[in-house]
Image (cartoon, grey):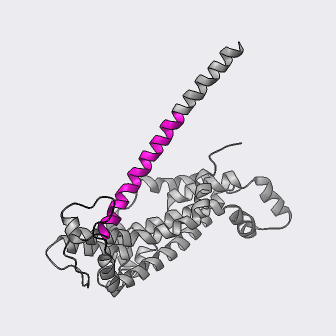
């Protein structure tokens, strides 16, 4: 019997080892599928035009050079667009989180009457919206065109992030903790500031990352609302015009950047726009992992 049990244990261990290998192999393949395209773009941005034109650049740069980045940094309008993007992203994230927290906290409390109806109204906006034209008319009537507020205020609220925040607050803040604070004389604002927010750092960091990345990567609304005031164009819109200019035969944007190969310009623009948000991610990674897993296990 002992020999039989040990044999079964060995078979189970081998079976589990095979599954471990398959899982690790899948994770490695998925990671490479995400990493290799970015490395390819970085390599093209650091390679000489001749090697890129000949399609000899894959993972490692050929004819290593920083010429593309030197020309980008020499253009003061791009640096100004970088400043606008950083400012817009910071303000957008702060305003979005304030609105989300102020809406999610009361919806997560059982004392609020009609919270089910209010939650349904927010969910309804996830499936149906007014559309681009009514939104443009609203922004125009409010006098926000060609200002940075036109790309901050309209998308500052996300119903999806609200639902995540509401669920996190409902599952992570015990009712007994709130009741004890009420016994001590604390009001809703004091409970929110002194108890709820300190205990919700993971989900706050996670949603802040969602807001920041979403705003940083978006350029379509700026394409609609920032037309005449070129100084207010964010980095993504500026790079969009540069890439289109490099791909077409006509001048779309006043710039000092001139490269013989459009592919090098495209690659350097992608890397230039991606690096800032990549540099921010490691500092909030631990909160991001905690926030994603929050509420995944029910006790």
**Figure label count:** 0
Along the line of sight, the residue nearer the viewer: 213 or 27: 27
Which residues lie in the magenta part? 19-46
Q: Is residue 110 visible?
A: no
Q: Is residue 244 left or right of residue 140?
A: left
Q: Residue furthest top?
A: 1
Q: Is residue 36 left or right of residue 186?
A: left
Along the line of sight, the residue nearer the viewer: 193 or 52: 52
Q: Residue furthest right?
A: 184
Along the line of sight, the residue nearer the viewer: 277 or 163: 277
Quadrant for residue 235, please give it: bottom left
Q: Main secondary structure of the magenta part?
A: helix
- Going 55% across and 33% down the picture, which residue do you hit? 17
**Is residue 30 shown in magenta?**
yes
**Is residue 90 shown in magenta?**
no
- Going 84% across and 67% down the picture, which residue do you hit? 185
- Going 79% across and 57% down the picture, which residue do you hit? 177
Q: Is residue 131 visible?
A: yes
Pick the quarter of the image with the C terminus: top right
Q: Position of residue 45 (x, y in %)?
A: 31, 69
Q: Position of residue 192 (x, y in %)?
A: 71, 66
Q: Position of residue 279 (x, y in %)?
A: 50, 70
Along the line of sight, the residue nearer the viewer: 163 or 39: 39
The relative height of residue 6 versus residue 285 in the rendered view (above or below) is above
Q: Is residue 134 left or right of residue 113?
A: left
- Going 75% across and 68% down the picture, which residue do you hit? 194
Pick the quarter of the image with the N terminus: top right
Q: Is residue 133 left or right of residue 20?
A: left
The relative height of residue 283 versus residue 13 in the rendered view (above or below) is below
Q: Position of residue 47 (x, y in %)?
A: 28, 69
């Amino acid at each position: 019997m002992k020999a039989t049990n040990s044999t079964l244990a060995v078979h189970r261990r081998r079976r589990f080892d095979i599954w471990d290998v398959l899982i690790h192999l899948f994770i490695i393949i998925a990671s490479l599928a995400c990493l290799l395209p970015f490395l390819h773009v970085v390599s093209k941005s650091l390679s000489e035009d001749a090697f890129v034109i000949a399609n000899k650049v894959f993972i490692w740069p050929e004819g290593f050079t920083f010429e593309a980045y030197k020309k980008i940094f020499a253009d003061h309008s791009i640096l100004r667009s970088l400043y606008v993007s950083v400012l817009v992203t910071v303000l957008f994230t702060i305003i979005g989180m304030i609105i989300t927290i102020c809406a999610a906290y009361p919806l997560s409390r059982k004392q609020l009457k009609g919270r089910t109806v209010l939650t349904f109204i927010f969910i309804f906006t996830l499936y149906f919206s007014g559309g681009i034209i009514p939104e443009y008319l609203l922004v125009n009537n409010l006098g926000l065109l060609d200002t940075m507020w036109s790309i901050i205020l309209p998308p500052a609220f996300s119903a999806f992030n609200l639902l995540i925040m509401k669920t996190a607050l409902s599952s992570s803040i015990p009712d007994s903790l709130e009741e004890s604070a009420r016994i001590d004389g604390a009001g809703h604002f004091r409970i929110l500031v002194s108890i709820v927010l300190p205990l919700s750092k993971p989900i706050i960091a996670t949603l802040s990352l969602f807001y920041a990345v979403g705003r940083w990567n978006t350029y379509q609304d700026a394409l609609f609302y920032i037309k005449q005031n070129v100084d207010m164009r964010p980095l993504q819109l500026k790079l969009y015009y540069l890439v289109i200019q490099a791909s077409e035969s006509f001048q779309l944007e006043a710039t000092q950047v001139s490269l013989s190969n459009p592919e090098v310009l495209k690659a350097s623009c992608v890397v230039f726009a991606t690096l800032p948000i990549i540099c921010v991610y490691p500092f909030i990674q631990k909160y991001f992992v905690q926030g994603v897993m929050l509420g995944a296990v029910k006790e």
